Amino acid sequence: MQFINPPGAPKPTSSYSQGVLVSASATRLIISGQVGVAPDGTVKQGMRAQTEQLFANMKAVLQAAGMDAGHVVKIVTYCTRPLETGVVREVRSDFFGSHTPASTFLIVPALANPDFLIEIEAEAIRED
């Protein structure tokens, strides 16, 4: 995989890449939107807690497929609180470290459950 931030495109404003180039011989994992619900079904309270929980859920899905955060090539974030995007970016950076997948961040009025503040879906690739 090659993460691309060419000089002809704007510099990313946080930890993401403008593009990701993947060879055709790879295993692809599409991860459904993850939310701040713990394995016991409880919804975490607050943006930080929900974001941390959804990344823990994502990690579990990745591990079940024999992958880790470094295999994630794209995430889409749906956030209901525009004033808390900084918290989301902090938790995302803690999860990915120096890894910078392609990213889209959307502010939405609501999610499937009114208690959900954030949802993130992802795509991961493991080159064969």
Image (cartoon, rainbow, N blue to C red):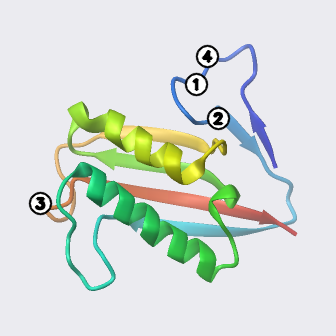
At label 4, which amino acid type do we have?
Answer: Pro
How packed is label 2: few (under 14 Cα within 10 Å), some, or many (20 or more)? Answer: many
Q: CB atoms at circles 2 and 1 under 8 Å apart?
A: yes
- According to the picture, the residue beneath numbered tag 1 turns out to be 12
Instruction: Mark 1 or mark 3: name the one nearer the start of the chain.
Output: 1
At label 3, which amino acid type do we have?
Answer: Pro
Q: CB atoms at circles 2 and 4 under 8 Å apart?
A: no
Instruction: Mark 3 or mark 2: name the one nearer the start of the chain.
Output: 2
* The label number, if any, that marks residue 63 in the structure image: none
- According to the picture, the residue beneath numbered tag 3 turns out to be 114
Q: Give how far apart the Cα atoms at labels 3 and 4 are.
A: 35 Å
- According to the picture, the residue beneath numbered tag 2 turns out to be 17
Instruction: Indicate the secondary structure of the residue bearing disc 1.
Output: loop
- According to the picture, the residue beneath numbered tag 4 turns out to be 10
- The number of callouts visible is 4
Percent across and percent down for residue 104 are 47, 40
In the displayed structure, 101 sits above or below 18; it is below
Percent across and percent down for residue 65 are 65, 79
Name the residue located 59 percent from the left edge and 36 percent from the top edge.
16
At label 2, which amino acid type do we have?
Answer: Ser
Instruction: Indicate the secondary structure of the residue bearing disc 4.
Output: loop
Instruction: Indicate the secondary structure of the residue bearing disc 3.
Output: loop
